[in-house]
Image (tube, rainbow, N blue to C red):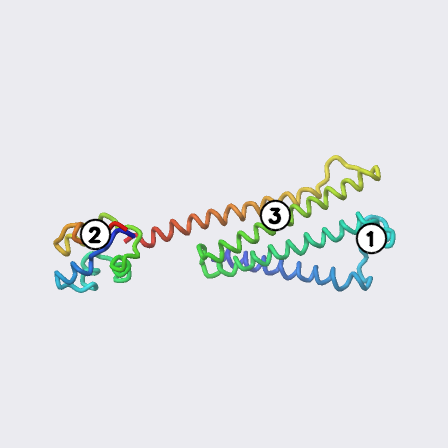
Amino acid sequence: MRRNIVFKTLIDILFIFQGFGILGAFLIMPFGVTKINQINLDVSEWSVTYWSLLVLSLIAFVVFIIGVFFLRKVGRYLLSNQYFAIEVIDNLKKSGRFFIYTGIISFSVFVISWIVKFNSGNVSLYNTDVVLPLFITIVGLFFLIQSDVLMVSKGAKEDNDLTI
Amino acid sequence: MPIIVNLDVMLAKRKMKSKDLAETIGITTANLSILKSGKARAIRFSTLEAICKALECQPSDILEYVKE
Protein backbone atom coordinates (compact mmCIF):
# COMPACT_ATOMS: atom_id res chain seq x y z
CA MET A 1 0.00 0.00 0.00
CA ARG A 2 2.83 2.37 0.91
CA ARG A 3 4.51 1.59 -2.42
CA ASN A 4 1.30 2.50 -4.24
CA ILE A 5 1.19 5.87 -2.47
CA VAL A 6 4.85 6.56 -3.32
CA PHE A 7 4.22 5.51 -6.95
CA LYS A 8 1.17 7.78 -7.30
CA THR A 9 2.97 10.70 -5.63
CA LEU A 10 6.02 10.37 -7.88
CA ILE A 11 3.85 10.12 -11.00
CA ASP A 12 1.89 13.21 -9.89
CA ILE A 13 5.12 15.15 -9.30
CA LEU A 14 6.47 14.06 -12.70
CA PHE A 15 3.21 15.03 -14.42
CA ILE A 16 3.05 18.44 -12.74
CA PHE A 17 6.69 19.27 -13.51
CA GLN A 18 6.35 18.08 -17.12
CA GLY A 19 3.16 20.15 -17.38
CA PHE A 20 5.03 23.24 -16.18
CA GLY A 21 7.74 22.40 -18.70
CA ILE A 22 5.36 22.32 -21.64
CA LEU A 23 3.65 25.51 -20.45
CA GLY A 24 7.06 27.13 -20.31
CA ALA A 25 7.90 25.90 -23.78
CA PHE A 26 4.75 27.31 -25.33
CA LEU A 27 4.32 30.49 -23.29
CA ILE A 28 7.80 31.69 -22.32
CA MET A 29 9.85 30.86 -25.43
CA PRO A 30 7.97 33.13 -27.88
CA PHE A 31 8.68 36.12 -25.60
CA GLY A 32 12.40 35.44 -25.73
CA VAL A 33 12.78 34.87 -21.99
CA THR A 34 14.39 31.48 -22.60
CA LYS A 35 16.95 31.00 -25.33
CA ILE A 36 16.64 27.93 -27.53
CA ASN A 37 20.02 28.34 -29.23
CA GLN A 38 21.22 24.84 -28.48
CA ILE A 39 23.15 24.20 -31.68
CA ASN A 40 25.57 27.13 -31.33
CA LEU A 41 23.54 28.95 -33.95
CA ASP A 42 21.20 31.88 -33.60
CA VAL A 43 17.53 31.00 -34.13
CA SER A 44 17.33 33.34 -37.11
CA GLU A 45 19.99 31.21 -38.86
CA TRP A 46 18.29 27.88 -38.23
CA SER A 47 17.55 25.69 -41.23
CA VAL A 48 14.36 23.64 -41.73
CA THR A 49 16.16 20.61 -40.24
CA TYR A 50 16.88 22.42 -36.96
CA TRP A 51 13.30 23.63 -36.74
CA SER A 52 11.98 20.14 -37.48
CA LEU A 53 14.22 18.83 -34.68
CA LEU A 54 12.70 21.33 -32.26
CA VAL A 55 9.13 20.53 -33.36
CA LEU A 56 9.77 16.78 -33.14
CA SER A 57 11.27 17.19 -29.66
CA LEU A 58 8.21 19.16 -28.54
CA ILE A 59 5.89 16.49 -30.00
CA ALA A 60 7.85 13.77 -28.14
CA PHE A 61 7.54 15.84 -24.97
CA VAL A 62 3.77 16.22 -25.33
CA VAL A 63 3.29 12.52 -26.18
CA PHE A 64 5.35 11.58 -23.11
CA ILE A 65 3.14 13.77 -20.91
CA ILE A 66 0.04 12.04 -22.30
CA GLY A 67 1.65 8.68 -21.41
CA VAL A 68 2.34 9.91 -17.87
CA PHE A 69 -1.28 11.16 -17.68
CA PHE A 70 -2.60 7.65 -18.37
CA LEU A 71 -0.11 6.24 -15.84
CA ARG A 72 -1.59 8.64 -13.27
CA LYS A 73 -4.99 7.11 -13.94
CA VAL A 74 -3.49 3.66 -13.28
CA GLY A 75 -2.02 4.96 -10.01
CA ARG A 76 -5.43 6.21 -8.91
CA TYR A 77 -6.87 2.68 -9.07
CA LEU A 78 -3.77 1.14 -7.47
CA LEU A 79 -4.31 3.37 -4.43
CA SER A 80 -7.59 1.55 -3.76
CA ASN A 81 -5.95 -1.85 -4.46
CA GLN A 82 -8.04 -2.43 -7.60
CA TYR A 83 -5.19 -4.20 -9.41
CA PHE A 84 -7.47 -6.07 -11.81
CA ALA A 85 -9.86 -3.23 -12.70
CA ILE A 86 -10.47 -2.96 -16.44
CA GLU A 87 -9.50 0.74 -16.20
CA VAL A 88 -6.02 -0.25 -14.97
CA ILE A 89 -5.60 -2.62 -17.91
CA ASP A 90 -6.85 -0.08 -20.49
CA ASN A 91 -4.87 2.86 -19.15
CA LEU A 92 -1.68 0.81 -18.79
CA LYS A 93 -2.03 -0.20 -22.44
CA LYS A 94 -2.61 3.42 -23.52
CA SER A 95 0.35 4.61 -21.42
CA GLY A 96 2.55 1.91 -22.95
CA ARG A 97 1.54 2.93 -26.48
CA PHE A 98 2.32 6.60 -25.82
CA PHE A 99 5.69 5.72 -24.29
CA ILE A 100 6.53 3.68 -27.40
CA TYR A 101 5.53 6.63 -29.61
CA THR A 102 7.74 8.89 -27.44
CA GLY A 103 10.64 6.47 -27.84
CA ILE A 104 10.21 6.30 -31.62
CA ILE A 105 9.94 10.09 -32.03
CA SER A 106 12.92 10.68 -29.71
CA PHE A 107 14.91 8.10 -31.63
CA SER A 108 14.10 9.82 -34.92
CA VAL A 109 15.24 13.12 -33.35
CA PHE A 110 18.49 11.40 -32.41
CA VAL A 111 18.92 10.01 -35.95
CA ILE A 112 18.23 13.39 -37.60
CA SER A 113 20.63 15.21 -35.26
CA TRP A 114 23.25 12.51 -35.90
CA ILE A 115 22.86 13.03 -39.66
CA VAL A 116 23.18 16.81 -39.19
CA LYS A 117 26.37 16.31 -37.15
CA PHE A 118 27.66 13.81 -39.69
CA ASN A 119 27.16 16.29 -42.53
CA SER A 120 28.97 18.98 -40.56
CA GLY A 121 31.87 16.56 -39.94
CA ASN A 122 31.28 16.53 -36.19
CA VAL A 123 30.38 12.89 -35.53
CA SER A 124 30.84 10.65 -32.52
CA LEU A 125 30.65 6.85 -32.68
CA TYR A 126 28.78 6.42 -29.40
CA ASN A 127 26.29 8.90 -28.03
CA THR A 128 24.39 8.48 -24.77
CA ASP A 129 21.42 10.42 -26.20
CA VAL A 130 20.15 7.13 -27.65
CA VAL A 131 19.85 5.43 -24.25
CA LEU A 132 16.76 7.35 -23.05
CA PRO A 133 14.60 6.75 -26.18
CA LEU A 134 15.53 3.07 -26.06
CA PHE A 135 14.66 2.84 -22.37
CA ILE A 136 11.32 4.62 -22.83
CA THR A 137 10.47 2.24 -25.70
CA ILE A 138 11.36 -0.75 -23.52
CA VAL A 139 9.20 0.60 -20.66
CA GLY A 140 6.32 1.16 -23.10
CA LEU A 141 6.61 -2.39 -24.41
CA PHE A 142 6.71 -3.72 -20.85
CA PHE A 143 3.51 -1.81 -20.03
CA LEU A 144 1.81 -3.36 -23.06
CA ILE A 145 2.93 -6.86 -21.98
CA GLN A 146 1.94 -6.15 -18.38
CA SER A 147 -1.48 -5.03 -19.57
CA ASP A 148 -1.95 -8.33 -21.44
CA VAL A 149 -0.77 -10.26 -18.37
CA LEU A 150 -3.28 -8.38 -16.19
CA MET A 151 -6.04 -9.20 -18.69
CA VAL A 152 -5.23 -12.95 -18.44
CA SER A 153 -4.97 -12.67 -14.64
CA LYS A 154 -8.33 -10.91 -14.49
CA GLY A 155 -9.94 -13.88 -16.28
CA ALA A 156 -8.24 -16.34 -13.92
CA LYS A 157 -9.35 -14.30 -10.89
CA GLU A 158 -12.95 -14.24 -12.14
CA ASP A 159 -12.81 -18.01 -12.67
CA ASN A 160 -11.49 -18.43 -9.14
CA ASP A 161 -14.08 -16.07 -7.64
CA LEU A 162 -16.93 -17.84 -9.42
CA THR A 163 -15.81 -21.34 -8.41
CA ILE A 164 -18.04 -22.41 -5.54
CA MET B 1 -24.54 -22.36 -20.41
CA PRO B 2 -26.03 -25.80 -21.16
CA ILE B 3 -25.51 -26.99 -17.56
CA ILE B 4 -28.58 -26.18 -15.46
CA VAL B 5 -28.37 -26.07 -11.66
CA ASN B 6 -31.54 -27.46 -10.09
CA LEU B 7 -30.64 -26.56 -6.54
CA ASP B 8 -33.90 -24.62 -6.05
CA VAL B 9 -35.93 -27.70 -6.95
CA MET B 10 -34.01 -29.93 -4.52
CA LEU B 11 -34.26 -27.33 -1.75
CA ALA B 12 -38.03 -27.15 -2.27
CA LYS B 13 -38.30 -30.95 -2.25
CA ARG B 14 -36.35 -31.17 1.01
CA LYS B 15 -38.18 -28.11 2.39
CA MET B 16 -34.87 -26.54 3.29
CA LYS B 17 -33.93 -22.85 3.21
CA SER B 18 -30.91 -21.57 1.29
CA LYS B 19 -29.49 -20.04 4.44
CA ASP B 20 -29.66 -23.39 6.30
CA LEU B 21 -28.00 -25.23 3.40
CA ALA B 22 -25.25 -22.60 3.21
CA GLU B 23 -24.58 -23.00 6.93
CA THR B 24 -24.60 -26.80 6.71
CA ILE B 25 -22.14 -27.03 3.81
CA GLY B 26 -19.99 -24.13 5.02
CA ILE B 27 -20.28 -21.60 2.21
CA THR B 28 -21.66 -18.08 2.22
CA THR B 29 -25.23 -17.37 1.15
CA ALA B 30 -23.80 -15.07 -1.53
CA ASN B 31 -21.86 -17.97 -3.06
CA LEU B 32 -24.91 -20.26 -2.80
CA SER B 33 -26.91 -17.57 -4.59
CA ILE B 34 -24.28 -17.46 -7.39
CA LEU B 35 -24.59 -21.26 -7.68
CA LYS B 36 -28.40 -21.19 -7.73
CA SER B 37 -28.56 -18.42 -10.33
CA GLY B 38 -26.26 -20.32 -12.69
CA LYS B 39 -23.59 -17.61 -12.67
CA ALA B 40 -20.96 -19.95 -11.23
CA ARG B 41 -18.15 -20.94 -13.62
CA ALA B 42 -17.24 -24.14 -11.72
CA ILE B 43 -18.11 -26.17 -8.66
CA ARG B 44 -15.60 -27.99 -6.45
CA PHE B 45 -16.10 -31.71 -5.85
CA SER B 46 -15.96 -30.99 -2.11
CA THR B 47 -18.85 -28.51 -2.40
CA LEU B 48 -20.86 -30.91 -4.56
CA GLU B 49 -20.21 -33.68 -2.06
CA ALA B 50 -21.35 -31.47 0.83
CA ILE B 51 -24.53 -30.45 -1.03
CA CYS B 52 -25.36 -34.06 -1.91
CA LYS B 53 -24.75 -35.10 1.70
CA ALA B 54 -26.94 -32.29 3.10
CA LEU B 55 -29.79 -32.81 0.63
CA GLU B 56 -29.42 -36.62 0.51
CA CYS B 57 -29.36 -36.69 -3.26
CA GLN B 58 -27.14 -37.50 -6.25
CA PRO B 59 -25.13 -34.96 -8.30
CA SER B 60 -27.47 -35.62 -11.21
CA ASP B 61 -30.37 -34.33 -9.09
CA ILE B 62 -28.63 -30.97 -8.86
CA LEU B 63 -26.90 -30.67 -12.23
CA GLU B 64 -28.59 -31.22 -15.57
CA TYR B 65 -27.31 -30.99 -19.14
CA VAL B 66 -29.64 -29.32 -21.61
CA LYS B 67 -28.66 -29.19 -25.28
CA GLU B 68 -28.58 -25.61 -26.59
Q: Disc 3 or 1, which lies upstream in sequence?
A: 1
Left or right of A154? Residue A133 is: right
Gap between marks 3 and 1 measured at Cα: 28 Å
Left or right of A155? Residue B39 is: left
Left or right of A14? Residue A164 is: left
Q: Residue B4 occupies which quadrant of the picture?
A: bottom left
Identify the residue position indicated by label 1 in the image.
A37
Q: Residue A21 occupies which quadrant of the picture?
A: bottom right
Q: Are marks 3 and 1 in contact (CB under 8 Å)?
A: no
Secondary structure state at the residue bearing disc 1: loop
**Which of the labelled discs sits on residue B63, or is there none?**
2
Residue at the image position 81 percent from the left and 49 percent from the top: A48
Circles 3 and 1 on the same chain: yes
Q: The disc labelled 1 sits on which kind of residue?
A: Asn
Q: Chain of mark 3?
A: A
Nearer to us in this view, A96 or B62:
B62
Label 1: how many Cα within 10 Å (few below 14, some 14–19, many 20+): few
Where is residue A109? Give x, y as percent: 72, 46
Residue at the image position 28 percent from the left and 57 percent from the top: B38
Q: Chain of mark 1?
A: A
Identify the residue position indicated by label 3 in the image.
A100
Secondary structure state at the residue bearing disc 2: strand
Gap between marks 1 and 2 measured at Cα: 77 Å
Residue at the image position 65 percent from the left and 49 percent from the top: A102
